[in-house]
Every structure is written in structure tokens, then in C-alpha cells.
Image (tube, rainbow, N blue to C red):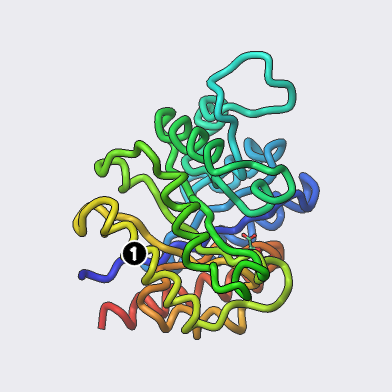
Amino acid sequence: MHPRRLLIGGNWKMNGDLAGGVELAEAVVAAFDPLNESVDAVLFPPFPYLQAIGRVLGHSGIRLGAQDCSSEANGAFTGDVSAEMLVDLGVSQVIIGHSERRHIHKESDALTCEKLHMALESGLQVMLCVGETGEERTAGQATAVVQRQLRGALNGLKADKLASITVAYEPVWAIGTGKSATPKDAAEAHDAIRADLEHLYDRPSSAAVRILYGGSVNAANAPSLFAHLEIEGALVGGASLKSADFASILGSAATAFKGRRG
Ligand code: PGA
């Protein structure tokens, strides 16, 4: 397969303030500029800062993302944000099924699926997160859990929509813990996800899906993760809040792409 650019996402979660976010985005734009031919990037700031960060990203080539969206189109859903509202603000991608939504907010596979369909219908690209907990891994259920989440979220999705989906494999035990999956374990999980996509759809349509790794990715471990072809980028939380670290991860992704191209 022709190698494609790696995608690096910065998930800021519920961190920072407006001025700090603008400053961070400006630094990321500067770091991305010389790399824009060799890496794809998207930032996921908190909702209230989307418009301001979108202005900073401008025509830099870095896309604007949101951390979640409602499964409903509009109406009496206090506190929720619709996919259409995100589109209105210039957002092009949305995270769906992040483990913090699944576990803290008890979002089910069924709700994740509804959100995914709503996002796609609104014209957004989806960053679908899947991943097992530490307990599930210890119990030998990691592959089964990821498969259940993947199938649950993609239920009813036609093959021609796969080009709008990115999957982020994010083992819950690795998120925010400083304990990343080993590159080999991550690559194996990615292989299993790829095989499942091919089983659910067909090889050419599932080839459109990039599979990223997330969970304690940092400047130091990014190169060894990206050494595996199965790992087509990263969804970065903590390290995306530090411009130098995020810039270094972008650089590693660009280097890995050049290496893959040969
Ligand atoms: P982390 O978060 O990089 O801080 O582990 C990743 C994520 O939750 O997307």
C-alpha cells in the first residue's frame, strides 16, 4: 500500500484558558508550517475556545476538531452541542467515544453509534476512540472489548463512509498514566482492528481508515511507536498541551512518513 501521512491529533480535554490556548495554537502553527507536506494535524480545543483557535489555525493546514457532539440534531438538550453547530464554527472533525465519555459519562456503544451517524450526516469527519480497561486486558478480553466497541459504533455504517472515519486505539490504562502501550502491543491491536474492519467491510474500503494510537504518547516514545507501519499517527492528550512536546511529536511523524516513503 502507498504510505500515507500520519495524523497527529492534540486533545486538549478540559484544560487551559483562552489566552493560553491561543498561544499554544500559535506555537503549533509555527512548528507545523515546515512539516505540512509530510504530516496531518488536528487540534481539539474545549468548545468555548473553538472559534478563537479556529482563527489562529486559519489556512495553516491544521484542522479544527471538537471533543464530542450530541446525538441529537437540535432541541431541548441543555448543555449539549450539536454537530451542525460545530460545522458552523469551522470544525471538520469530532472525537466520538473517547474513554472519558464512555467511562465517566457512561456513554454506551449505542449512543456512540448515534453520535457517529449524526456527525457524519452533518459532514464532520469522525475520530472514533476504542480501547480496553486494565482489568479487561488482564482478563484477556482486550481484543473482544475493542471489537465490540468498533462494531457497536459502526453499526449501520455503509462502506463508502469509511473514508470519513479515523480510529484511535486508546487503551484506557494508558491514558494519562505515563504508561504507554509498547509499540509492539499497540501494533498488534491495530492489526486486529484492521482485520475486523476488513471482515466487516472489504479491504479497499477499510484501507481508507487510518488507525492511530493514543495513551501517554510523548516526545520520547513517539519515534518508536511510529516505527511500526500499523501505527498511522497518534491522539495526544497531556503532551499536546506543551508546544515543544507536540512539535516534537509532529516532527517524528513527518520523519516516519519520509522513512515509509523510502
Ligand atoms: P494522554 O491522553 O496522551 O494524556 O494519555 C490521550 C487521550 O486521551 O486522547
At horizontal 64% and vertical 48% (from top left) the residue drawn is: 102
Q: Within the displayed image, which quadrant is ligand 1 positioned in?
A: bottom right
User: From the image, which quarter does the C terminus lie in?
Assistant: bottom left
Which of 143/130 is in front? 143
Kind of element beneath mark 1: helix
Left or right of 184? Residue 131 is right
> Residue 232 is drawn in which quadrant?
bottom left
Instruction: Report the quarter where the N terminus lies.
Output: bottom left
- At label 1, counting other C-alpha atoms closer than 10 Å, the crowd grade (few under 14, some 14-19, many 20 or more) is many
In the image, residue 20 lies at what x, y percent? 77, 53
Residue 261 at what x, y percent from top left?
A: 26, 78
Nearest the viewer among 69 and 4 is: 69
**Quick check: is the Cβ at mark 1 less than 8 Å away from ligand 1?**
no
Compare residues 226 and 39 and report the one nearer the observer: 226
Residue drawn 45% across and 71% down?
189
Amino acid type at mark 1? Arg
- Is 258 rendered above or below residue 194? below
